[in-house]
Image (tube, rainbow, N blue to C red):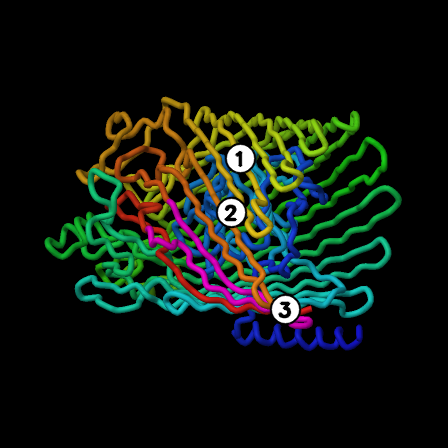
Amino acid sequence: MKAMKRSTLATLINATLFSAVAGTSFSSAAEDAPAAEKSNQLEVIQVTARKRVENAQEVPVAVSALQGDKLDAYSSAGMDIRFMNAKIPSLSIESSYGRTFPRFYVRGLGNTDFDLNASQPVSLVVDDVVQESAILKGFPVFDVERVEVLRGPQGTLFGRNTPAGLVKFDSVKPSQEFDGFSSVSYGTNNSIDFRGAVGGGLTENLSARVSVLWQGKDDYIDNRAPGFEQDDILGGYTDRAARIQFLYEKDDFSALLNYHVRNMEGTPIPFYANAIQAGSNELVDGFDADVVYHDAAAREFQVVDSQGASLKLEYDFANHTLTSITGWESAEVNSRGDIDGGYGAAFLGDYQGPGVIPFPSESESGLPDHNQYTQELRLSSNFAGDFNYQTGLFYFDESVTIENFGYDTLAGGSLNGYVNQQQDTKAWAVFGSVDYTVSDDLKLTAGLRYSDDDKDFVAVRKFVPADLSECNFDLMQCETDIIRTEDASDDHISWDLSASYKLTDDMNLYGRIANTFRAPSIQGRITFSDELTKADSETVTSYETGIKSDVLDGRGRVNATIFYYTMNDQQLTAVGGTANTTRLLNADKTTGYGFELDTEWVLTDELNATFNLSYNNTELKDDTIAIAVPNRSTLTITDPMVDGNAIIDGNSLPHAPEWISNLTLRYSKELGDGEFFTYADVSYRSEINYFLYESVEFEGKALTEVGLRSGYAWADGDYEYQVAVFARNLFDKQQSIGAIDFNNNTAMVNEGRFVGAEFKVNFF
C-alpha cells in the first residue's frame, strides 16, 4: 500500500509541476485542514515566536495567529496579502502599487515610502527567511500552515529592521503522510482562484510537497478620457505561484529544501483624479470606481517575477540542536501608471479633467536586478533543567538595481526622464537568548544582539535626447546629467528582558522591555529632483505587560496587552507634496501607547466567536520639521504653516489608525451526512492620515468591511468535499484609502463588493 501511495504521489507531483509550467491553475489553497471534530474547548495554538514551538499562551510576547477557517474566509476572492489589514490587533497593510509592494504597519509604525529600495520597520519572515524588499513581501499566501504577527520590537532573535514587529508565515511542510487538496472558485469580474497541493513520502526518509496557485481577473475598469475611450482596460491580473519542498529525515538529522516562484501580470492600482471633494474627505458625487479618465491607460502595466530557495539543515545531538538556514531571493518588477489619474493639463485650456490637472504625470518604476542572500547559524540547548539558551550568527547581503522613468504623456508617452539607482547592503549580527526557570511559576528570558549594517548607494540621472539613437538606444550611454553617491553604516546592540508568571493553571502574566533599531536608509529618487536624502538609524525602546488566560473551563480565551514606546530619530518619508518624489528625514522623538485585546469563545457546541480590539495613540515630537505641501485651493491644510510648509509637531503617524477591531462568528451544524457552516467577519479601522501633514481632504474615513462565507462539507472515504459561497465587502462600502497629493486630489479606493462560489476537495 505504501509503495502504491508513493507511486501515486510521484505521478501527482509530476502532473502538478507540468500544470504549473504550462500555465494551468493548481491553486495552492490556504491551509485547509479537514473539518475538526466537535469540541467544546478551544484548541491549543502553537507558535514559533521565539524560534521554537511553544504554546502561544505561555510566550511573553504579544502574538496573534491566523489559521484554518479564518485564513480561508479572509483570502477568499483571490485577495493578495492585504487581506490581513485590520484582521489582527494593531496591524494595518496598504499599497499604492496594488498586488505588489505591501506596506505593513504595527502599533502605528510603518513607512509610506514608495521607492523600490525603501526599508520598513515591520519585517516579514517566510519559512524562516527574511523578505527585506517590499516586492518580496507581496508573494501570494497559499498552502500556509500558520500566520503569526509579533507586535513590538523583535530585534534580538529576528534580526533586521523589526522595531515595530514581525509578520511570520510558515507554509505546510512535507511529511510521510499522503495528503493534498484542490480548490477552485469563481466570482465577480470573471475572477478565478485555483489552488492545489499534494505531498507525502517518496522514500522511507524523503518526503515532498508541491503547492501551486493560479489567480486571475478580467479587466473591468472603463476609460472615458476624451479621445482615449476604451472599455475594460484596467483592473485585471493573472497571478501564478508555486512552491516545491523536499524534506529528508534520518535519525537526528533533517534537511528541508524549499524553492518558490511567482509571475504576476496585470495593471497597477488605479488612480482617480480629483476624486476627493475639496473641503471634505468624501468622494465626489457620482464617483464610479469602474470608470477612470486616463490619457495613459493603454500604456499602464505591472509585471512581477520573483523566485527564491532556502535550505534548512538541522542536527540534534546530545542536549543541543544545530540549525543552519541558507536563503536566496530574487525579484524583477516593472510598474507603469497614470499617476495624475486624469487627462490633459491646465495649460491646454479646456482639455483637462476630471477637474483641474496642473500637469500630466506618467511614470514607471523598475527593478531589473535584485538578489538577496541570507545565512543564519543557530545553536539551541535542549536541557531538561531550569536553564536553556540560543545563540547564533546572521549574515545578510542584498544588491538592488532600480530604474525610474518619466514620460511625456502629451507626446504619446515618450521618455523624458531616467534615473538608475544602485544599492548594496551588507549586514551581520551575533545574538543570544537565555531562558531561566526561577520556580514552577516564574520564568525569565534575556536576549542580546549586536548588529552591523553597511549600505552603498549611487544614483545616476541621464539626459534623455529626443532621438535615442544618439545613445545607441542605450540610456546608460547617454550624457550624464547628475550623479549622486552616498553611504550609510551603523551598529547597534539590541536587547530584551521578559518575565512570565503563572498566576493560576489557566492564567499567565507577563512583562517585557525591548530595544532595537532600524538601519540607516538612503533615498535617491531624483527623476524630478536633484536631492538625495539619508535618514540615520532609528531606535526604539518598548515597555509592555499583559495577561494570557483560558477561562470558562477552556471555552474562552482572553489575552490583553498594554504598551508604551519611545522612538528616537524615527525615519520618516515625506511623500509627494510639490513633486512626484520622496524625501527622508529623522524626527527627534515619537511616542506611542495603547492596548490590545485578543479573545476567542466557544459560545455553544455549534457557535464559535472571536473578538479583537486595539487602541494606538502615536505622536510626533519635533517642532523643527517643516513639510512642503501642495498650494492649491482644493486642499485644506490644518497644520500650522510657515513659509508655505506645514509644521507636523504633534501629529499622529500616517496610516496609523487609533482603533482596529475585528469580530468573527462561525456556526456549524450536522446536516445529513455532512456539515453546514457559516462564517461571518466584520473588520473596522478608524480614521487615518495619508501623509505626515494633516488636511481635511487627506484624512481617510473610518472603514468597516463585512465578509461572509457559507457552505456544506461532507466526507466520502479518503476524500472530503466542500462547496461554499462567499462575499467580501458585503455592503459594497467604497471610499478613499490613499491619495496622491502633488498634482490634484487624486484618490485610491478599496476593493468593491466581491461575490463568488468555491468547490474544494481534500484527499488522504
Quarter of the rendering containing residue 473: bottom left
Q: Position of residue 84 (x, y in %)?
A: 49, 49
Q: Indicate the amino acid at tag 2.
A: Gln
For this orientation, the residue located farthest to the left is 349
Q: Is residue 481 above or below residue 502?
A: below
Tell me the CA gap for discs 3 and 1: 37 Å
Q: Which residues are magenta?
A: 704-733
Q: Which residue is mark 3?
A: 715
Tell me the CA gap for discs 1 and 2: 41 Å
Q: Is residue 302 above or below residue 663?
A: below
Q: Secondary structure of the magenta portion, mostly? A: strand
Q: Secondary structure at mark 1?
A: strand
Q: Is residue 346 left or right of residue 450?
A: left
Q: Which residue is mark 1?
A: 597
Residue 728 in the magenta stretch? The answer is yes
Marks 3 and 1: CB-CB under 8 Å?
no
Q: Position of residue 621 (x, y in %)?
A: 41, 23
Marks 1 and 2: CB-CB under 8 Å?
no
Q: Which residue is mark 2?
A: 423
Q: Nearer the viewer, residue 264 or 288?
A: 288
Residue 349 in the magenta stretch? The answer is no
Numbered badge on residue 468? none
Nearer the observer: mark 3 or 1; the answer is 3
Neighbour tally class for label 3: few under 14, some 14-19, many 20 plus, Cα within 10 Å: some
Q: Indicate the amino acid at tag 3.
A: Ala
Q: Secondary structure at mark 3?
A: strand
Q: Is residue 511 above or below residue 752?
A: above
